Each structure stands twice: as structure tokens, then as C-alpha cells.
């Protein structure tokens, strides 16, 4: 479960950013700082995002799930950032459709076999707009972890 893997050092409330590159530099920098990613991670994020945008509009709530190739990763991790103000990303599957992103779930995935399962688990969580609103409103990283824990337990119970 994602909540069990979350590192409090990688959860940010009201992150200040003017553009997506700021998000990549701040969150990617923390991945590097805490040993989750290699020095090449931020550059690789920016390059991948230009080819494969990661913005999603979930019922009017903007999400981005940036990630990059495993060659830039040391170990699995998820960084979560609630942005102080929305930042423009490009909608996944398009080249030019903007999405105003409020929440970012950045991934570092070392094992390529786990890549899709990580993405699927994130997508299950973010499909619930109430969960997104709770994460956005949470005041502390512990609150974010508990919100995700509660949603994952709910999903597992329903399965």
C-alpha cells in the first residue's frame, strides 16, 4: 500500500511554484537529497514531461503524476505536493491542452515491473475527488498519510 511507503520528508503542503519546472526542481531535489533519485533525475523529469505530459483533470481538480525512467532512480518513493496556487501542466495524452494542477504525485520507481502497479494505485486514490480535496486541505504530512491510508483501506475492503 502506498501509505506504508510514504516518507514525511517528501510531503509538502502549500508548495510555492510558478511553473511545472519549479515543481520538478523542488520535489526532484528532495528525491535526490534523500537518496531516492540520481542527480540526473530533474533533467530527466523535464525531458519526459515535454514528450509525455502527466497532467490530469479529475472532475475539475488538476493532478500531475510526473515520473521518469528507472535509470535515474535509486529506490521507490512517492512525493506529494499540494500547490499554493495552481500550476499549468499539459493534459496527459495531448500536446497542448493545459491543466491547472493543484496536487502533484511524483514517483520514483526503481523496478520496472512495479511501475504500472504504482501508477494504478495512485490512480485508484485520485479518482475520488473528496480524497483530493482532503489532501489539498490537510495541514500536516501526517494528515495526508492518514487520508491515503483510509482510502486504501476502503478500496481493499470493497475489493
Image (spheres, helix red, strand yellow):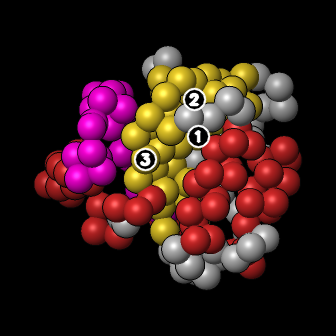
Q: From this view, report whether residue 28 is shown above or below residue 102.
A: below
Label 2: few (<14), some (14–19) or many (≥20) C-alpha neighbours in 10 Å: many
Q: Secondary structure at mark 1?
A: strand
Q: Where does the image place residue 84, in percent across and percent down from the top left?
A: 49, 28
Residue drawn 51% across the image and 49% down it: 105
Label 3: few (<14), some (14–19) or many (≥20) C-alpha neighbours in 10 Å: many
Q: Disc 1 and disc 3: Cα gap in Å? A: 14 Å
Badge 2 or badge 1: first in the primary sequence: 1
Badge 1 or badge 3: first in the primary sequence: 3
Q: Which residues are magenta?
A: 118-144
Say left or right for 62 vs 71: left
Q: Which residue is mark 2?
A: 101
Give the quadrant of the N terminus: bottom left
Say left or right for 95 vs 38: right
Q: Secondary structure at mark 3?
A: strand
Residue 63 forms part of the magenta stretch: no
Badge 3 or badge 2: first in the primary sequence: 3
Q: Which residue is mark 3?
A: 12
Quadrant in the rendering for residue 115: bottom right
Q: Which circle marks residue 64 in the picture?
A: 1
Residue in the foreground of this view, choosing between 89 and 95: 89
Label 1: few (<14), some (14–19) or many (≥20) C-alpha neighbours in 10 Å: many
Residue drawn 58% across the image and 71% down it: 33
Q: Confirm whether residue 142 shows in the render.
A: yes
Q: Secondary structure at mark 2?
A: strand
Q: Where does the image place residue 119, in percent across and percent down from the top left?
A: 52, 56
Residue 127 forms part of the magenta stretch: yes
Residue in the foreground of this view, choosing between 19 and 129: 19
Q: Confirm whether residue 151 shows in the render.
A: no
Say left or right for 19 vs 118: right
Residues at badges 2 and 1 in contact (C-beta under 8 Å)? yes
Q: Where does the image place residue 72, in percent across and percent down from the top left?
A: 72, 74
Amino acid at each position: 500500500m502506498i501509505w506504508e511507503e510514504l516518507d514525511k520528508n517528501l510531503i509538502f503542503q502549500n508548495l510555492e511554484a510558478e511553473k511545472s519546472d519549479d515543481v520538478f526542481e523542488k520535489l526532484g531535489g528532495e528525491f535526490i537529497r534523500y537518496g531516492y533519485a540520481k542527480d540526473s533525475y530533474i533533467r530527466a523529469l523535464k525531458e519526459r514531461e515535454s514528450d509525455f505530459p502527466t497532467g490530469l483533470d479529475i472532475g475539475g481538480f488538476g493532478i500531475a503524476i510526473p515520473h521518469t525512467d528507472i535509470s535515474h532512480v535509486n529506490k521507490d518513493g512517492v512525493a506529494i505536493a499540494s500547490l499554493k496556487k495552481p500550476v499549468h501542466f499539459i493534459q496527459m495524452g495531448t500536446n497542448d491542452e493545459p491543466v491547472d494542477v493543484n496536487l502533484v504525485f511524483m514517483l520514483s520507481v526503481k523496478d520496472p515491473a512495479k511501475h504500472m502497479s504504482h501508477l494504478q494505485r495512485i490512480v485508484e486514490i485520485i479518482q475520488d475527488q473528496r480524497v483530493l480535496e482532503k489532501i489539498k486541505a490537510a495541514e500536516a504530512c501526517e494528515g495526508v498519510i492518514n487520508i491515503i491510508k483510509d482510502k486504501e483501506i476502503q478500496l481493499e475492503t470493497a475489493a
